Image (cartoon, rainbow, N blue to C red):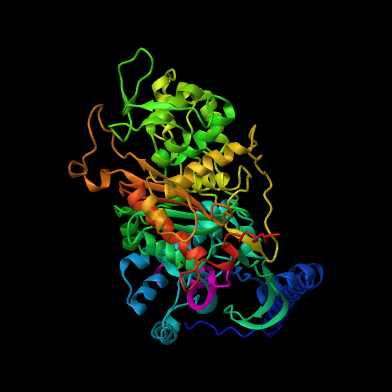
Amino acid sequence: MPQPIRLKDHEKDGRLIRKRAVVGAVLVLLLTSVLLTRLYYLQVVQFEHHTTLAENNRIHVQPIPPNRGLIYDRNGVIIADNRPSFSLTLTRERAGDWTQVLDVIVEVLELGPDERVLFERRVRQGRRPFEPVPVLFELSEEQIARVAVNQFRLPGVEVAAQLVRHYPLGEHFAHSVGYVGRINEKELKTLDPVSYSGTHHIGKTGIERFYEDELHGEVGYEEVETNARGRVLRVLKRTDPTPGKDIVLSLDIRLQEAAEAALAGRRGAIVAIQPQTGEVLAMVSQPSFDPNPFVTGIGFKAYADLRDSIDRPLYNRVLRGLYPPGSTIKPMVAVSGLDSGVVTAQTRVFDPGYYQLPNLQHKYRNWNRSGDGWVDMDLAISRSNDTYFYSLAHKMGIDRLHDYMSRFGLGQRVSLDMFEETAGLMPSRDWKRARYRQAWYPGETLILGIGQGYMQTTPLQLAQATTLMATRGKWIRPHLAKSIQGRVPVDPNPLPDIVLRDPKFWDNGRHGMEQVMHGPRGTARKVGDAALYRIAGKSGTAQVVAIKQGEKYDRSKVAERHRDHALFVAFAPVDNPQIAVSVMVENGESGSGVAAPVVKQVIDAWLLDENGQLKAEYAPPVAAEVSAP
């Protein structure tokens, strides 16, 4: 039989629908309550917090790097300026996979693998969040166009205009002014992150490093409104940065070029100082290098070529080159002997061509093997007689010799603002005991008396010692900065003047130096005879390789780079010193024959006018004529 058909229970269905409606309404009310509660919490309870977050997403504080101070020579010629340049920057937080973006940059600009490695190194360096990092400098118009066309492939990449350090004179002042370079990881840990926010370069060497605080300036800020992509829509507030201070150096570009020309491409160093002020007028270390590639990042191959060159162009010979001073210190030793009382100006020594210590057979040779006979102080300096100074050094002893030479600045840093300067070495008993655990021998004192042996000096130290002879012991540290924003730098730790028992002792030493240039037996009289003014000078030879006892120096048997260095120091005019010069020509062999002409060319460039005549302000005073009664 068929099943009976059930009739629909409308009342039951109605109850079910009503129950579902109630449950649904309750759920809607609950969800609405949760939503309203959450909305109240966010909008009322955490209003300030979320307002701040929103403002931080919309408004950013960006640092404005200050313009670096300019550097001029004493005549107002710009040595270091700031040149506009377009740079390619990348912001890691906006770039997504920034390593892939770097690959795209290399592809778009058709760069090599070395640049790709350099870019990644720059991006990985520590920096503030959302701070753009320059990866490529000095973009060409073609490169800017390529970046613009491929902008959709380069998120977080922008072309930014900025000022980049530039050295218009190139190699001329590379070793004195130095250069700036990118801040590295080590420097980043020691720098004030606020002061250097937005700044990517810092002084690395020379004046750029020593006066970094003055040249850098103070950072500024601006509040900007950005969109969701980080693009700046408008500037809300701006605090301008304070530019760095300008520095005027005592260097003279004309004298610098003249000194470089005098070296004529030879390896060497020249320092010229104004005795009365301590201002460094010229500072040459040859060969030199162009500092501009170091600013934006020099390539690996280019740097390797400079670093590995046998001529060492990166090496600052003026401040870091250590050489035995040779006979250039004999005038200082003579003055020290007079002041210590072991000799007088009239004391004579017989020179048979050598000197022997009592009861010893070893002969300490004079450069003139045939000897000069009886020699007094004046002739000893003018002839550069080794025998006389062997005797004088023996009479003084190492302790007094060390004390006096230290007062002339040997074995210590003498400059005011050249942080790269090496102290050199003025040996003593204590030094040898600590270094070699040996006693000091009398023969070592003799060798020290003629500027050989353990003694090591820089060309700058020799120039300063010569300056002290010119000023009769008045100590003024040599310095490169003539003024900083109009302010003259002051020596915070001045050294005491050299005060002798009798000031006439200075005249004895100076007269011997004058006889070197103008005396009948002076070693550099050929150079002195050609001068329009009186020069006080002294030659020197620094041995590179030792010569055995009894052997003579034979240049034909010595490799060019093993030949003696040629040195010469001088000041002029004698009666009114205006310039003191120190010259070192590597492997030049003859101080009088090679280095002395270089000294004269430098002094001529400073004292003579365009017509080759002595400038009026440097001419000796004319004695007034006395009329007959």
Is 1 located above or below residue 173 in the figure?
below
Residue 507 vertical placement versus 436 (above, below): below
Q: Is residue 574 magenta?
A: no
Q: Identify which residue, 530 or 146, lies in the foreground.
A: 530
Which contiguous range is marked in magenta? Answer: 71-100
Q: Is residue 546 left or right of residue 292?
A: left
Which residue shows up at 33% across the image and 15% down it? Answer: 360
Query: Where residue 285 appears, x then y in whole percent?
Result: 42, 56
Q: Is residue 612 above or below residue 210?
A: below
Residue 379 in view, yes or no: yes
Residue in the foreground of this view, choosing between 118 and 150:
118
Residue placed at 48% from the left, 54% from the top? 271
Q: Residue furthest left?
A: 557
Q: Position of residue 18 (x, y in %)?
A: 73, 80
Location of residue 560 in the rendering, given as x and y in whole percent from the top left corner: 24, 48
On the image, the x and y values in percent for residue 523 come to 37, 45
Instruction: Kindly tell me whether residue 435 is visible in this rendering.
Output: no
